[in-house]
Image (cartoon, rainbow, N blue to C red):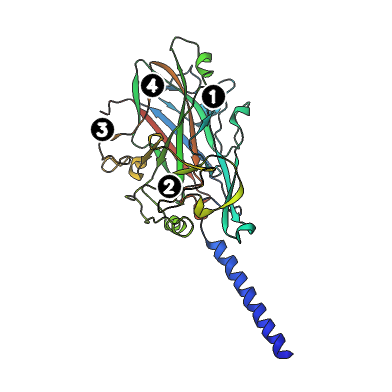
């Protein structure tokens, strides 16, 4: 009997040891999306938007400037729905727009009991921007309106230095590798019309998404991509090829195992919940573009020269209302636990120089 009990005790100890090992592995693993027990804050967030000569910018269609700042954004105009939060929670979008607003989904990653404890993703739609009556400083992402004025039809390009960088003086977490921003063109009106006419524009139907720093990945992201998504990446501070961007397009109520959310090897994600952002709707710029490196900046597929600034949209003569979004993309492999608690600066420069 003593031998039998000793055998049971040894088996029990082995099971306990295995359980502890499993917990340890889960606690040290990384995934796209932060897990629930990790910080999801980025505080503060700095935004600077500059416009070149010949292009005027405003946050109320009344006071025209060459640069707008956080203060201008939070002031906005009567009835504005600007959201300049001090904290960002990872969210995802496939780029779809409903009633002039970009659709976002906030995901949660945790072990799913019905999937044998495998790490899986669920997602809910974020708060409805249309329901806001004033600035919302506690949103999951940044969103605000700007107005651009030109005296003739023209193309608009991202100036060098447009992108996301680690905030000066802060310890790098490299969450800027998972950052995004986007533009929704809400409509255009003549310069002679009232500011109220421009403010009321809200007819956007599609978005242009910019993925800065596409060519860099951390070692944790490499592990994440390989272990959970069957995607092979290389650790690099620059020079890596871009990864397909597959965003969430609908709420996920039944947990989906991670490798089925953004799979590699030519596999297709679940089309009910995920969708690749169309190539024509996404612009990818490298790390050097964000840092204004005159020798190596580029956007994907182009070289390094002033003629290769990335074109984002075209403007018609008059005043155009544009809704701008800034967020951390949860589906990006560099959005993982080790990168939480970062401090980022979003820089956006617009130019109408002839890039042909």
* Quarter of the view holding residue 219: bottom left
Query: Which label sits on residue 315?
Result: 4
State whether residue 98 is above or below residue 107.
above
Give how far apart the Cα atoms at labels 4 and 1 are.
21 Å
Query: Which label sits on residue 307?
Result: 3
- The residue indicated by pointer 2 is 177
Residues at discs 3 and 4 in contact (Cβ within 8 Å): no
Residue at the bottom extreme, as displayed: 2
Select label 2 or label 4 by which is in front: 4
Residue 70 is at least partly visible in this image: yes
Give how far apart the Cα atoms at labels 3 and 2 are.
25 Å
Which quadrant: the N terminus?
bottom right
Give how far apart the Cα atoms at labels 1 and 2 are.
29 Å
> Residue, x 54% and y 18% (percent of image)?
200
Residue at the top extreme, as displayed: 192
Mark found first going from the N terminus, 4 or 1: 1
State whether residue 304 is above or below residue 200.
below
Mark found first going from the N terminus, 2 or 4: 2
Residues at discs 2 and 4 in contact (Cβ within 8 Å): no
Select label 4 or label 1 by which is in front: 4
- The residue indicated by pointer 1 is 76
């Amino acid at each position: 009997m003593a031998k039998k009990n000793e055998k049971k005790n040894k088996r029990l100890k082995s099971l306990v040891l295995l359980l502890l090992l499993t917990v340890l592995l889960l606690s040290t693993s990384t995934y796209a999306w932060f897990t629930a027990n990790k910080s999801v804050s980025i505080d503060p967030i700095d935004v600077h938007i500059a416009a070149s000569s010949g292009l005027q910018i405003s946050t109320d269609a009344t006071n025209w400037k060459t640069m707008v700042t956080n203060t201008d954004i939070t002031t906005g105009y009567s009835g504005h729905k600007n959201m300049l939060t001090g904290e960002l929670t990872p969210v995802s979008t496939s780029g779809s727009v409903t009633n002039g607003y970009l659709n976002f989904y906030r995901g949660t990653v945790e072990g799913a009991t019905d999937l044998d404890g495998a790490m899986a993703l669920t997602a809910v739609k974020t708060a409805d921007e249309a329901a806001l009556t004033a600035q919302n400083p506690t949103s999951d992402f940044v969103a605000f309106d700007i107005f651009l004025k030109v005296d003739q039809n023209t193309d608009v390009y991202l100036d060098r230095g447009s992108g996301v960088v680690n905030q000066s003086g802060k310890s790098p977490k490299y969450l800027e590798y998972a950052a995004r921003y986007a533009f929704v063109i809400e409509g255009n009106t003549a310069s002679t019309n009232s500011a109220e006419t421009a403010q009321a524009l809200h007819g956007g139907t599609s978005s242009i998404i910019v993925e800065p720093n596409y060519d860099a990945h951390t070692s944790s992201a490499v592990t994440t991509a390989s272990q959970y998504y069957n995607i092979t990446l290389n650790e690099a501070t620059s020079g890596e090829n871009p990864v397909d961007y597959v965003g969430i397009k609908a709420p996920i109520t039944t947990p989906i195992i991670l490798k089925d959310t953004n799979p590699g090897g030519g596999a297709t994600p679940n089309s009910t919940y995920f969708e690749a952002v169309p190539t024509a709707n996404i612009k990818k710029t490298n790390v050097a573009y964000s840092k204004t490196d005159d020798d190596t900046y580029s956007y994907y597929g182009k070289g390094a020269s002033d003629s290769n600034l990335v074109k984002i949209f075209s403007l018609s003569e008059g005043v155009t209302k544009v809704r701008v979004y800034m967020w951390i993309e949860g589906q990006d492999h560099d959005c993982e636990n080790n990168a939480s608690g970062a401090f980022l600066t979003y820089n956006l420069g617009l130019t109408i120089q002839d890039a042909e």
